[in-house]
Image (cartoon, rainbow, N blue to C red):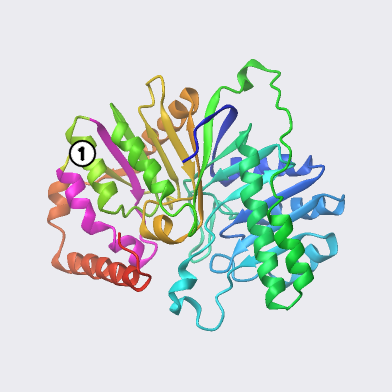
Protein backbone atom coordinates (compact mmCIF):
# COMPACT_ATOMS: atom_id res chain seq x y z
CA UNK A 1 0.00 0.00 0.00
CA UNK A 2 1.21 3.50 -0.80
CA UNK A 3 1.93 5.78 2.14
CA UNK A 4 -0.79 7.97 3.59
CA UNK A 5 -0.45 11.45 2.09
CA UNK A 6 -1.37 14.64 3.99
CA UNK A 7 -3.47 17.54 2.80
CA UNK A 8 -6.96 16.07 2.36
CA UNK A 9 -10.45 17.26 3.15
CA UNK A 10 -12.84 14.39 3.89
CA UNK A 11 -16.61 14.68 4.19
CA UNK A 12 -18.66 11.69 5.34
CA UNK A 13 -21.86 11.05 3.40
CA UNK A 14 -24.53 8.67 4.68
CA UNK A 15 -26.83 7.05 2.16
CA UNK A 16 -27.72 8.00 -1.36
CA UNK A 17 -29.67 11.03 -0.17
CA UNK A 18 -26.49 12.76 0.99
CA UNK A 19 -24.18 11.31 -1.66
CA UNK A 20 -26.34 12.05 -4.69
CA UNK A 21 -27.00 15.63 -3.58
CA UNK A 22 -23.23 16.20 -3.24
CA UNK A 23 -22.50 14.52 -6.58
CA UNK A 24 -25.16 16.51 -8.43
CA UNK A 25 -23.79 19.74 -6.95
CA UNK A 26 -20.28 18.89 -8.18
CA UNK A 27 -21.47 17.70 -11.60
CA UNK A 28 -23.56 20.84 -12.07
CA UNK A 29 -20.40 22.93 -11.65
CA UNK A 30 -18.15 20.69 -13.75
CA UNK A 31 -16.24 22.53 -16.46
CA UNK A 32 -14.10 19.82 -18.09
CA UNK A 33 -14.77 16.23 -17.12
CA UNK A 34 -16.96 13.85 -15.11
CA UNK A 35 -15.83 10.23 -14.74
CA UNK A 36 -18.09 7.73 -12.98
CA UNK A 37 -17.76 4.02 -12.21
CA UNK A 38 -20.45 2.02 -10.47
CA UNK A 39 -21.57 -1.56 -10.11
CA UNK A 40 -25.29 -0.74 -10.32
CA UNK A 41 -26.79 2.21 -12.16
CA UNK A 42 -30.55 2.10 -11.73
CA UNK A 43 -32.71 4.73 -13.42
CA UNK A 44 -35.51 4.79 -10.84
CA UNK A 45 -35.95 7.75 -8.48
CA UNK A 46 -32.65 9.25 -7.35
CA UNK A 47 -30.74 7.23 -9.96
CA UNK A 48 -32.56 9.15 -12.68
CA UNK A 49 -31.50 12.41 -11.01
CA UNK A 50 -27.84 11.42 -11.43
CA UNK A 51 -28.46 10.45 -15.05
CA UNK A 52 -30.10 13.81 -15.74
CA UNK A 53 -27.13 15.62 -14.15
CA UNK A 54 -24.75 13.70 -16.45
CA UNK A 55 -26.86 14.61 -19.50
CA UNK A 56 -26.92 18.30 -18.56
CA UNK A 57 -23.14 18.33 -18.06
CA UNK A 58 -22.50 16.67 -21.43
CA UNK A 59 -24.82 19.14 -23.19
CA UNK A 60 -22.75 22.07 -22.01
CA UNK A 61 -19.57 20.49 -23.37
CA UNK A 62 -18.23 18.58 -20.35
CA UNK A 63 -16.64 15.21 -21.18
CA UNK A 64 -18.79 12.63 -19.39
CA UNK A 65 -17.76 8.98 -19.20
CA UNK A 66 -19.80 6.34 -17.38
CA UNK A 67 -18.78 2.72 -16.78
CA UNK A 68 -21.14 0.16 -15.24
CA UNK A 69 -20.69 -3.53 -14.50
CA UNK A 70 -22.20 -6.22 -16.73
CA UNK A 71 -23.76 -8.09 -13.79
CA UNK A 72 -24.89 -5.13 -11.70
CA UNK A 73 -26.16 -3.26 -14.76
CA UNK A 74 -26.57 -5.69 -17.68
CA UNK A 75 -27.92 -2.97 -19.97
CA UNK A 76 -28.72 0.71 -20.10
CA UNK A 77 -32.46 1.20 -20.83
CA UNK A 78 -33.12 2.05 -24.49
CA UNK A 79 -34.63 5.46 -23.75
CA UNK A 80 -31.60 6.43 -21.67
CA UNK A 81 -29.24 5.16 -24.36
CA UNK A 82 -30.93 7.60 -26.72
CA UNK A 83 -30.71 10.47 -24.23
CA UNK A 84 -27.06 9.73 -23.54
CA UNK A 85 -26.26 9.56 -27.25
CA UNK A 86 -28.06 12.85 -27.98
CA UNK A 87 -26.22 14.64 -25.16
CA UNK A 88 -22.81 13.06 -25.83
CA UNK A 89 -22.54 10.97 -22.63
CA UNK A 90 -20.05 8.17 -23.27
CA UNK A 91 -20.88 4.88 -21.54
CA UNK A 92 -19.53 1.36 -21.42
CA UNK A 93 -20.66 -1.94 -19.84
CA UNK A 94 -17.72 -3.70 -18.19
CA UNK A 95 -17.40 -7.41 -19.01
CA UNK A 96 -20.88 -8.26 -20.35
CA UNK A 97 -21.83 -11.81 -19.44
CA UNK A 98 -22.59 -13.23 -22.88
CA UNK A 99 -24.57 -16.40 -23.47
CA UNK A 100 -22.95 -18.58 -20.80
CA UNK A 101 -23.17 -15.88 -18.16
CA UNK A 102 -21.75 -16.70 -14.75
CA UNK A 103 -21.19 -20.34 -15.68
CA UNK A 104 -17.69 -19.23 -16.71
CA UNK A 105 -15.55 -18.59 -13.59
CA UNK A 106 -13.61 -15.80 -15.30
CA UNK A 107 -16.89 -13.87 -15.44
CA UNK A 108 -16.93 -13.67 -11.65
CA UNK A 109 -14.30 -10.91 -11.77
CA UNK A 110 -16.56 -7.90 -11.61
CA UNK A 111 -16.20 -4.12 -11.49
CA UNK A 112 -17.46 -3.44 -7.98
CA UNK A 113 -15.84 -0.03 -7.44
CA UNK A 114 -17.97 3.05 -6.82
CA UNK A 115 -15.80 5.99 -7.88
CA UNK A 116 -16.54 9.42 -9.28
CA UNK A 117 -14.13 12.24 -10.08
CA UNK A 118 -15.11 15.72 -11.27
CA UNK A 119 -12.63 18.03 -13.00
CA UNK A 120 -9.74 16.22 -11.31
CA UNK A 121 -10.55 18.23 -8.19
CA UNK A 122 -13.22 16.34 -6.23
CA UNK A 123 -13.66 12.58 -5.88
CA UNK A 124 -16.25 10.31 -4.31
CA UNK A 125 -15.62 6.79 -3.05
CA UNK A 126 -17.79 4.40 -1.08
CA UNK A 127 -20.17 1.50 -1.14
CA UNK A 128 -23.20 3.28 -2.56
CA UNK A 129 -24.44 2.28 -6.01
CA UNK A 130 -26.40 4.69 -8.17
CA UNK A 131 -29.59 3.27 -6.71
CA UNK A 132 -32.38 5.03 -4.83
CA UNK A 133 -32.14 4.47 -1.06
CA UNK A 134 -35.78 3.35 -0.92
CA UNK A 135 -35.72 1.09 -3.99
CA UNK A 136 -34.47 -2.49 -4.23
CA UNK A 137 -34.02 -4.23 -7.58
CA UNK A 138 -35.62 -7.45 -6.30
CA UNK A 139 -38.01 -6.30 -3.57
CA UNK A 140 -39.13 -2.94 -4.91
CA UNK A 141 -40.06 -0.21 -2.45
CA UNK A 142 -38.25 -0.26 0.91
CA UNK A 143 -39.82 1.01 4.12
CA UNK A 144 -36.51 2.34 5.44
CA UNK A 145 -33.43 3.58 3.55
CA UNK A 146 -30.45 1.38 2.80
CA UNK A 147 -27.62 1.85 5.35
CA UNK A 148 -24.46 2.82 3.50
CA UNK A 149 -21.67 5.38 3.34
CA UNK A 150 -19.42 7.27 0.95
CA UNK A 151 -16.77 9.95 1.29
CA UNK A 152 -16.16 13.12 -0.67
CA UNK A 153 -12.45 13.82 -1.01
CA UNK A 154 -10.49 16.88 -1.98
CA UNK A 155 -6.73 16.70 -2.04
CA UNK A 156 -3.90 14.74 -3.69
CA UNK A 157 -5.79 11.44 -3.60
CA UNK A 158 -8.21 12.79 -6.22
CA UNK A 159 -5.53 12.36 -8.88
CA UNK A 160 -5.12 8.71 -8.01
CA UNK A 161 -8.86 8.24 -8.51
CA UNK A 162 -8.66 10.05 -11.84
CA UNK A 163 -5.77 7.89 -12.94
CA UNK A 164 -7.35 4.52 -12.13
CA UNK A 165 -10.75 5.42 -13.60
CA UNK A 166 -9.20 6.86 -16.78
CA UNK A 167 -6.85 3.93 -17.25
CA UNK A 168 -9.64 1.38 -16.97
CA UNK A 169 -11.77 3.35 -19.42
CA UNK A 170 -9.08 3.56 -22.09
CA UNK A 171 -7.95 -0.03 -21.59
CA UNK A 172 -11.49 -1.32 -22.07
CA UNK A 173 -11.84 0.88 -25.14
CA UNK A 174 -8.61 -0.53 -26.54
CA UNK A 175 -9.81 -4.11 -26.00
CA UNK A 176 -13.14 -3.36 -27.64
CA UNK A 177 -11.46 -1.76 -30.63
CA UNK A 178 -9.08 -4.70 -30.97
CA UNK A 179 -12.03 -7.07 -31.05
CA UNK A 180 -13.52 -4.89 -33.78
CA UNK A 181 -10.12 -4.94 -35.56
CA UNK A 182 -9.84 -1.16 -35.39
CA UNK A 183 -6.13 -1.32 -34.63
CA UNK A 184 -5.34 2.37 -35.05
CA UNK A 185 -8.08 3.34 -32.58
CA UNK A 186 -6.96 0.61 -30.19
CA UNK A 187 -3.39 1.93 -30.30
CA UNK A 188 -4.63 5.46 -29.52
CA UNK A 189 -6.73 4.21 -26.59
CA UNK A 190 -3.75 2.29 -25.22
CA UNK A 191 -1.63 5.43 -25.52
CA UNK A 192 -4.24 7.47 -23.65
CA UNK A 193 -4.38 4.83 -20.91
CA UNK A 194 -0.68 5.43 -20.32
CA UNK A 195 -1.23 9.19 -20.05
CA UNK A 196 -4.22 9.08 -17.72
CA UNK A 197 -2.70 11.07 -14.87
CA UNK A 198 -3.44 14.81 -15.13
CA UNK A 199 -1.32 17.62 -13.76
CA UNK A 200 -2.43 18.13 -10.15
CA UNK A 201 -4.13 21.47 -9.50
CA UNK A 202 -3.25 23.53 -6.45
CA UNK A 203 -5.63 23.01 -3.51
CA UNK A 204 -6.54 25.86 -1.22
CA UNK A 205 -8.72 26.01 1.87
CA UNK A 206 -10.35 29.28 2.87
CA UNK A 207 -12.42 28.22 5.89
CA UNK A 208 -11.01 26.74 9.07
CA UNK A 209 -13.65 23.97 9.20
CA UNK A 210 -12.51 22.81 5.74
CA UNK A 211 -8.80 22.80 6.48
CA UNK A 212 -6.98 19.96 4.77
CA UNK A 213 -5.65 18.01 7.74
CA UNK A 214 -6.48 14.41 6.91
CA UNK A 215 -3.93 11.87 5.74
CA UNK A 216 -5.42 9.52 3.16
CA UNK A 217 -4.63 7.00 0.45
CA UNK A 218 -6.60 5.17 -2.22
CA UNK A 219 -6.33 1.38 -1.77
CA UNK A 220 -7.28 -0.85 -4.70
CA UNK A 221 -7.91 -4.53 -5.35
CA UNK A 222 -7.59 -5.91 -8.85
CA UNK A 223 -6.37 -9.09 -10.50
CA UNK A 224 -2.95 -7.81 -11.59
CA UNK A 225 -0.98 -5.52 -9.27
CA UNK A 226 -3.20 -5.29 -6.19
CA UNK A 227 -4.46 -8.81 -5.57
CA UNK A 228 -4.28 -8.70 -1.75
CA UNK A 229 -3.76 -5.02 -1.01
CA UNK A 230 -7.09 -4.31 0.70
CA UNK A 231 -6.94 -7.49 2.79
CA UNK A 232 -3.37 -6.76 3.89
CA UNK A 233 -4.34 -3.19 4.78
CA UNK A 234 -7.08 -4.52 7.07
CA UNK A 235 -4.73 -7.08 8.60
CA UNK A 236 -2.10 -4.45 9.47
CA UNK A 237 -4.66 -2.13 11.00
CA UNK A 238 -6.35 -4.88 13.04
CA UNK A 239 -2.96 -6.15 14.21
CA UNK A 240 -2.04 -2.67 15.45
CA UNK A 241 -5.38 -1.99 17.19
CA UNK A 242 -5.08 -1.07 20.86
CA UNK A 243 -8.57 -0.20 22.10
CA UNK A 244 -11.47 -0.75 19.73
CA UNK A 245 -12.42 -2.04 16.29
CA UNK A 246 -15.81 -1.16 14.81
CA UNK A 247 -16.80 -2.68 11.46
CA UNK A 248 -19.92 -2.49 9.33
CA UNK A 249 -19.89 -4.90 6.42
CA UNK A 250 -22.77 -6.03 4.24
CA UNK A 251 -21.33 -9.36 3.10
CA UNK A 252 -19.12 -10.48 5.94
CA UNK A 253 -17.31 -13.77 5.39
CA UNK A 254 -13.69 -13.14 6.44
CA UNK A 255 -11.06 -15.69 5.49
CA UNK A 256 -8.85 -17.47 7.94
CA UNK A 257 -6.25 -14.71 8.27
CA UNK A 258 -8.84 -12.00 8.94
CA UNK A 259 -10.76 -14.19 11.39
CA UNK A 260 -7.60 -14.99 13.32
CA UNK A 261 -6.61 -11.31 13.37
CA UNK A 262 -9.99 -10.32 14.83
CA UNK A 263 -9.90 -13.14 17.38
CA UNK A 264 -6.36 -12.26 18.47
CA UNK A 265 -7.37 -8.61 18.85
CA UNK A 266 -10.32 -9.55 21.05
CA UNK A 267 -8.15 -11.86 23.17
CA UNK A 268 -5.64 -9.10 23.87
CA UNK A 269 -8.43 -6.87 25.20
CA UNK A 270 -9.49 -4.90 22.12
CA UNK A 271 -13.25 -4.32 21.91
CA UNK A 272 -14.35 -5.75 18.55
CA UNK A 273 -17.85 -5.03 17.23
CA UNK A 274 -19.27 -5.89 13.82
CA UNK A 275 -22.54 -4.66 12.29
CA UNK A 276 -23.88 -7.23 9.81
CA UNK A 277 -26.64 -7.62 7.27
CA UNK A 278 -29.75 -8.63 9.22
CA UNK A 279 -32.13 -9.17 6.33
CA UNK A 280 -32.27 -12.25 4.16
CA UNK A 281 -31.19 -11.11 0.71
CA UNK A 282 -29.59 -14.10 -1.07
CA UNK A 283 -29.16 -17.74 -0.04
CA UNK A 284 -25.38 -17.73 -0.40
CA UNK A 285 -24.67 -14.37 1.22
CA UNK A 286 -26.91 -15.13 4.20
CA UNK A 287 -26.06 -18.76 4.94
CA UNK A 288 -22.41 -19.07 3.86
CA UNK A 289 -21.26 -16.50 6.43
CA UNK A 290 -22.94 -18.05 9.45
CA UNK A 291 -20.54 -20.98 10.04
CA UNK A 292 -17.78 -18.48 10.94
CA UNK A 293 -19.88 -16.59 13.51
CA UNK A 294 -19.43 -19.18 16.25
CA UNK A 295 -15.66 -18.78 16.64
CA UNK A 296 -16.02 -14.99 16.62
CA UNK A 297 -18.71 -15.02 19.31
CA UNK A 298 -16.66 -17.46 21.40
CA UNK A 299 -13.72 -15.02 21.29
CA UNK A 300 -15.90 -12.25 22.72
CA UNK A 301 -16.51 -10.39 19.46
CA UNK A 302 -19.86 -8.58 19.37
CA UNK A 303 -21.99 -9.29 16.30
CA UNK A 304 -25.03 -7.11 15.59
CA UNK A 305 -27.50 -7.60 12.75
CA UNK A 306 -28.97 -4.47 11.18
CA UNK A 307 -32.75 -4.77 11.17
CA UNK A 308 -34.68 -1.81 9.64
CA UNK A 309 -33.54 -2.20 6.02
CA UNK A 310 -30.68 -3.59 3.96
CA UNK A 311 -27.19 -2.87 5.27
CA UNK A 312 -24.80 -2.20 2.39
CA UNK A 313 -21.93 -0.41 4.15
CA UNK A 314 -18.26 -1.43 3.89
CA UNK A 315 -16.55 0.68 6.55
CA UNK A 316 -14.31 0.26 9.59
CA UNK A 317 -12.93 2.46 12.37
CA UNK A 318 -10.04 1.48 14.65
CA UNK A 319 -8.97 3.35 17.80
CA UNK A 320 -11.19 6.32 16.99
CA UNK A 321 -10.20 8.26 20.12
CA UNK A 322 -6.45 7.82 19.66
CA UNK A 323 -4.16 10.42 18.14
CA UNK A 324 -3.83 8.33 14.96
CA UNK A 325 -7.26 6.75 14.36
CA UNK A 326 -7.57 4.44 11.35
CA UNK A 327 -10.64 4.53 9.15
CA UNK A 328 -11.63 3.01 5.83
CA UNK A 329 -14.63 3.50 3.60
CA UNK A 330 -15.16 2.00 0.17
CA UNK A 331 -16.66 -0.76 -1.95
CA UNK A 332 -14.87 -3.83 -0.59
CA UNK A 333 -16.77 -6.34 1.48
CA UNK A 334 -14.85 -8.70 3.74
CA UNK A 335 -15.81 -11.74 1.68
CA UNK A 336 -14.13 -13.82 -1.04
CA UNK A 337 -15.81 -12.08 -3.97
CA UNK A 338 -14.43 -8.70 -2.94
CA UNK A 339 -11.07 -9.83 -1.58
CA UNK A 340 -10.19 -12.36 -4.28
CA UNK A 341 -12.06 -11.57 -7.51
CA UNK A 342 -13.58 -8.11 -7.92
CA UNK A 343 -12.11 -4.71 -8.70
CA UNK A 344 -12.54 -2.70 -5.50
CA UNK A 345 -11.56 0.71 -4.17
CA UNK A 346 -11.35 1.96 -0.57
CA UNK A 347 -10.17 5.21 0.93
CA UNK A 348 -8.01 4.67 4.02
CA UNK A 349 -7.49 7.71 6.22
CA UNK A 350 -6.15 9.07 9.47
CA UNK A 351 -8.52 11.84 10.55
CA UNK A 352 -9.80 12.18 14.12
CA UNK A 353 -13.04 14.06 13.42
CA UNK A 354 -13.96 11.77 10.51
CA UNK A 355 -13.26 8.63 12.57
CA UNK A 356 -15.26 9.87 15.57
CA UNK A 357 -18.19 10.85 13.34
CA UNK A 358 -18.31 7.49 11.56
CA UNK A 359 -17.91 5.50 14.78
CA UNK A 360 -20.75 7.43 16.42
CA UNK A 361 -23.07 6.63 13.51
CA UNK A 362 -22.17 2.95 13.63
CA UNK A 363 -22.66 2.79 17.41
CA UNK A 364 -26.05 4.47 17.08
CA UNK A 365 -27.10 1.95 14.45
CA UNK A 366 -25.96 -0.95 16.66
CA UNK A 367 -27.71 0.32 19.78
CA UNK A 368 -31.00 1.45 18.24
CA UNK A 369 -31.37 -0.52 15.00
CA UNK A 370 -29.30 -3.65 15.53
CA UNK A 371 -30.05 -7.07 17.00
CA UNK A 372 -27.13 -8.48 19.01
CA UNK A 373 -26.37 -12.12 18.30
CA UNK A 374 -26.40 -14.15 21.50
CA UNK A 375 -23.75 -16.87 21.56
CA UNK A 376 -25.95 -19.40 23.39
CA UNK A 377 -28.98 -18.84 21.16
CA UNK A 378 -26.85 -18.96 18.03
CA UNK A 379 -25.42 -22.32 19.11
CA UNK A 380 -28.98 -23.65 19.55
CA UNK A 381 -30.20 -22.88 16.03
CA UNK A 382 -32.04 -25.74 14.37
CA UNK A 383 -30.36 -28.64 12.60
CA UNK A 384 -32.01 -27.52 9.37
CA UNK A 385 -30.54 -24.04 9.71
CA UNK A 386 -27.09 -25.46 10.36
CA UNK A 387 -27.39 -27.76 7.34
CA UNK A 388 -28.26 -24.83 5.08
CA UNK A 389 -25.36 -22.81 6.51
CA UNK A 390 -22.81 -25.55 5.87
CA UNK A 391 -24.25 -26.31 2.44
CA UNK A 392 -23.81 -22.68 1.42
CA UNK A 393 -20.33 -22.56 2.95
CA UNK A 394 -19.32 -25.72 1.07
CA UNK A 395 -20.69 -24.40 -2.21
CA UNK A 396 -18.71 -21.20 -1.68
CA UNK A 397 -15.48 -23.12 -1.10
CA UNK A 398 -16.15 -25.30 -4.15
CA UNK A 399 -16.79 -22.25 -6.33
CA UNK A 400 -13.53 -20.66 -5.18
CA UNK A 401 -11.68 -23.88 -6.01
CA UNK A 402 -12.95 -23.57 -9.58
CA UNK A 403 -11.18 -20.20 -9.82
CA UNK A 404 -7.97 -21.60 -8.32
CA UNK A 405 -8.35 -19.42 -5.20
CA UNK A 406 -7.82 -20.36 -1.57
CA UNK A 407 -9.49 -18.36 1.19
On the image, the x and y values in percent for residue 43 come to 66, 61
Q: Is residue 44 left or right of residue 278?
A: right
* Viewport quadrant of the C terminus: bottom left
On the image, the x and y values in percent for residue 210 come to 63, 22
> Would residue 43 be visible to someone looking at this image?
no
Point 49% across, 58% down: residue: 224
Name the residue at the bottom extreme: 99
Along the viewing direction, whichever of 98 and 181 lies nearer the viewer? 181
Name the residue at the right extreme: 60
The answer to if 283 sits in the magenta stretch is yes
Q: As displayed, is residue 269 above or below residue 44?
A: above
Point 63% across, 33% down: residue: 156
Along the viewing direction, whichever of 24 and 98 lies nearer the viewer? 98
Q: What span is in magenta?
A: 270-298
> Would residue 190 be visible to someone looking at this image?
yes
Around disc 1, counting alpha carbons within 10 Å, would you say few (fewer than 14), some (14 to 19), or many (20 or more)?
some
Q: Find disc 1 in the rendering and name its residue.
A: 264
Q: Is residue 15 left or right of residue 265?
A: right
On the image, the x and y values in percent for residue 381 come to 16, 59
The answer to if 63 sits in the magenta stretch is no
On the image, the x and y values in percent for residue 94 come to 60, 66
As helix, strand or loop, the secondary structure at mark 1 comes to: helix
Q: Could you say which quadrant of the image residue 5 lies in?
A: top right
Q: Could you say which quadrant of the image residue 87 lies in?
A: bottom right
Amino acid sequence: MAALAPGHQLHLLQGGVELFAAMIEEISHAQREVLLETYIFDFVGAGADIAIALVHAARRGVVVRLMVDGVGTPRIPADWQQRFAAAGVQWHVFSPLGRLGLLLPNRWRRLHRKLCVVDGRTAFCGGINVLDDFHDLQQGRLEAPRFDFAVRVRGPLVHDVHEVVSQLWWRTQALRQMRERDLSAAWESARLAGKARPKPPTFTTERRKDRAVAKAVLVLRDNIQHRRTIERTYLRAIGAARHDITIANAYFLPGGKLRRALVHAARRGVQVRVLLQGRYEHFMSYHAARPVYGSLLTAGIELHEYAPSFLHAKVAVIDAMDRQPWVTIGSSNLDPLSLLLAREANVVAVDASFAIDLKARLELAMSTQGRPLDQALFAQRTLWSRALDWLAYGLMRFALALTGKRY
